[in-house]
Image (cartoon, rainbow, N blue to C red):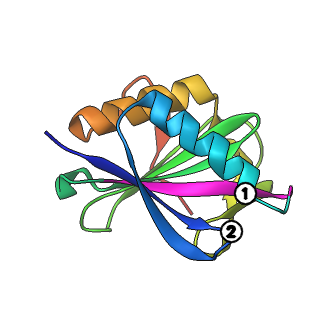
Amino acid sequence: MTHTEAKFWNPQTNKLTTEPVSDQDSIEKLISELSKKYPNPNTLPGFELVSSNKTYGTLAIAVAPFGWAIIHTSEDHLTQHCTNSKQGSDEESLDVQWEEVDSVPRKWFIPKNEALVGIKQWMLDGTLSPAVAWCDKCY
């Protein structure tokens, strides 16, 4: 059985924090707690999911009130896939707090429920759900 951890930079302590997550409820609880810690309303929370099965790669997740963006990075760090809502332009982006603030294109944000389907599939077996629109142009 694999175990998954969420890793994020705590904006109050500026330290890397790791918490175990096991399902949709624990991820939503984490996001609720993270959202309260961000002092800048113009910067969205971001976190990374890491599985004990390293062949899964990682998922980086940005959370906005209108949707979530997911970036999957392969185990060898050579391949990335990102969610794609096909809405918004390449120029429109939002600031997300990872270790540092980085911009994420608006078009990568998909509805929360769709994102949760993708996260659940990845946590189950490390694959990218066909129910989610993925793109390999994550730059």
Read off the magenta span. Answer: 41-50
Query: For the point 32% across and 68% down, which residue is it?
Result: 77
Tell me the quarter of the picture where residue 55 sits: bottom left
User: What residue does disc 2 label?
Assistant: 11
With 97 as the anchor, is 82 left or right in this view? left
Residue 22: % across, % down: 35, 37
Identified by mark 2, the residue type is Pro
Q: Can residue 108 be seen in this view?
A: no
Which corner quadrant holds the N terminus?
Answer: top left
Q: Can residue 72 be seen in this view?
A: yes
Crowd tier of the residue under label 2, counting other residues whose Cα lies within 10 Å: few below 14, some 14–19, many 20 or above: some
Query: For the point 52% across and 32% down, which residue is it?
Result: 115
Query: Circle 1 sits in a helix, a strand or a loop, which is it?
Result: helix
Whether 44 is among the magenta residues is yes
Query: For the point 33% across and 30% down, which residue is it?
Result: 121
Which corner quadrant holds the C terminus?
Answer: bottom right
Query: Circle 2 sits in a helix, a strand or a loop, which is it?
Result: loop
Residue 60: % across, % down: 48, 55
Give the label on residue 37, or none.
1
With 38 as the anchor, is 72 left or right in this view? left
In the depicted structure, whether residue 31 falls above or below residue 44: above
Identified by mark 1, the residue type is Lys
Whether 131 is among the magenta residues is no
Of pointers 2 and 1, the one earlier in the residue sequence:
2
Q: Are marks 2 and 1 in contact (CB under 8 Å)?
A: yes
